[in-house]
Every structure is written in C-alpha cells, then in structure tokens.
C-alpha cells in the first residue's frame, strides 16, 4: 500500500502514518469552533487519500468518518481500506463512536481502523472494534 509506515508495536496491521498526518493536518487547519471538531482521512484501495470533517449540530450530525465515506463516494473511491479520525485542539487520534463502527463495518467489512494514542497507535480490523456485531439480514449468507 502506498504511503504506509512501519507496523505499530501493538498492532497486527501496519499503521498508515501518511493517513494520520492527513487527518491531523485537516484537524489543525479546518476544525475551528464548535461546528467542526474532528477530521477523518481514509485511504481508498487505489491509494488515494480522502478527507472530511464532522458536522456538529445540537440535533445530531454526521461524524467525520461518515462524511469521509460520502466524500470518497463523490470522488469515485468506493472501496476504502483504512480510516482514521483526529480531534481538534491537539487531541490526536480518536476512536470511532458506536454508530460509526457499525456503519464502517456494514459498508467496508475488511476495513482497517487506526486507533490509540501518541506513539501507541495500532491498526485493527473494524470487526475487532465491534465484536458480536449486528449483521443486516441482506448481508447474511
């Protein structure tokens, strides 16, 4: 995979450091105020990096991971391999919420998600973040 770094000490898959850097840069430059507080970056199977920010609203709103899925689709990147989210104000990598874990698993069951803090980042299969997960009837064999 283009742009991947060495495997993290605690992970079973390589951590895509270029992806973390892209999300971090976006969080530092585009997340301002209360409306956009998390940035996400995803690597498509063809190597492209797609980024997005969350849309916070008191009635609810899409997390950065969900917006990045839509942005990727709009760019013709329908097969995502890896995703990471980074919080604003130097919070670093943040794990996906429960809703995002379910959506990511449903759309991309082979997806790798980067989680952890600081120098202890790890790349894990999305299924490990949502054990005993719900499976749509349409997706069952």
Image (cartoon, rainbow, N blue to C red):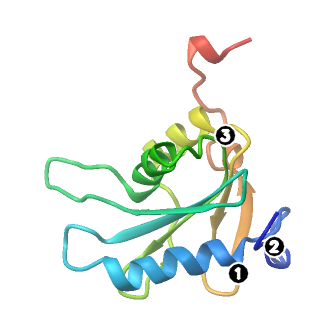
Residue furthest out toward the front: 76
Relative to 103, does residue 52 appear above or below in the rendering?
below
Q: Quadrant of the N terminus?
A: bottom right
Q: Nearer the viewer, residue 104 or 81?
A: 81
Q: Residues within 10 Å of mark 1 (few under 14, many from 20)?
A: few
- CA separation in Å, label 3 and label 1: 22 Å
Q: Residues within 10 Å of mark 3 (few under 14, many from 20)?
A: few
The correct choice, above or below, for 137 with respect to 119 in the image is: above
Of mark 3 and mark 1, the one earlier in the sequence is 1
- In primary-sequence order, the first of circles 2 and 3 is 2
Rendered residue at 26%/58% (across/down): 55
Q: Nearer the viewer, residue 47 or 66?
A: 47
- Horizontal side of 46 relative to 107 (left or right) equals right
> What x and y, as percent, mark residue 19?
63, 71
Q: Are marks 2 and 3 in contact (CB under 8 Å)?
A: no
Estimate the spatial distance between the alpha carbons at disc 1 and disc 2, rounded to whole Å.
Answer: 7 Å
Q: Secondary structure at mark 2?
A: loop
Q: Are marks 1 and 2 in contact (CB under 8 Å)?
A: yes
Q: What is the x, y in percent for residue 140?
A: 68, 14
Q: Residue under circle 2?
A: 10
In the displayed structure image, the side of residue 92 where residue 112 appears, left or right: right
Spot occupied by residue 99 in the image (x, y as percentages of width and height):
43, 43
Residue lying at 71% horizontally and 60% vertically, measured from the top left? 47
- What's the mark number on residue 120? 1
* Residue in the foreground of this view, choosing between 129 and 87: 87
Identify the residue position indicated by label 3 in the image: 131
Quarter of the image holding residue 110? top right
Q: Residue at x 61, y 32 (%)?
A: 133
Residue lying at 62% horizontally and 43% vertically, measured from the top left: 130
Q: Specify which label sits upstream in the sequence, 1 or 2.
A: 2
């Amino acid at each position: 995979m283009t742009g991947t770094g060495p495997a993290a000490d605690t992970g079973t898959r390589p951590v895509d450091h270029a992806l973390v850097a892209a999300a971090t840069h976006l969080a530092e430059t585009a997340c301002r105020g209360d409306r956009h507080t998390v940035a996400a970056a995803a690597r498509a199977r063809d190597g492209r990096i797609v980024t997005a920010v969350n849309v916070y609203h008191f009635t609810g709103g899409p997390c950065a991971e969900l917006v990045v899925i839509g942005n990727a689709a709009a760019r013709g990147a329908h097969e995502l391999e890896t995703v990471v989210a980074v919080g604003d104000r130097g919070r670093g990598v943040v794990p996906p919420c429960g809703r995002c874990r379910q959506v990511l698993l449903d759309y991309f069951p082979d997806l790798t998600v980067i989680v952890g803090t600081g120098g202890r980042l790890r790349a894990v299969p999305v299924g490990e973040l949502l054990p005993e997960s719900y499976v749509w009837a349409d997706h069952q064999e």
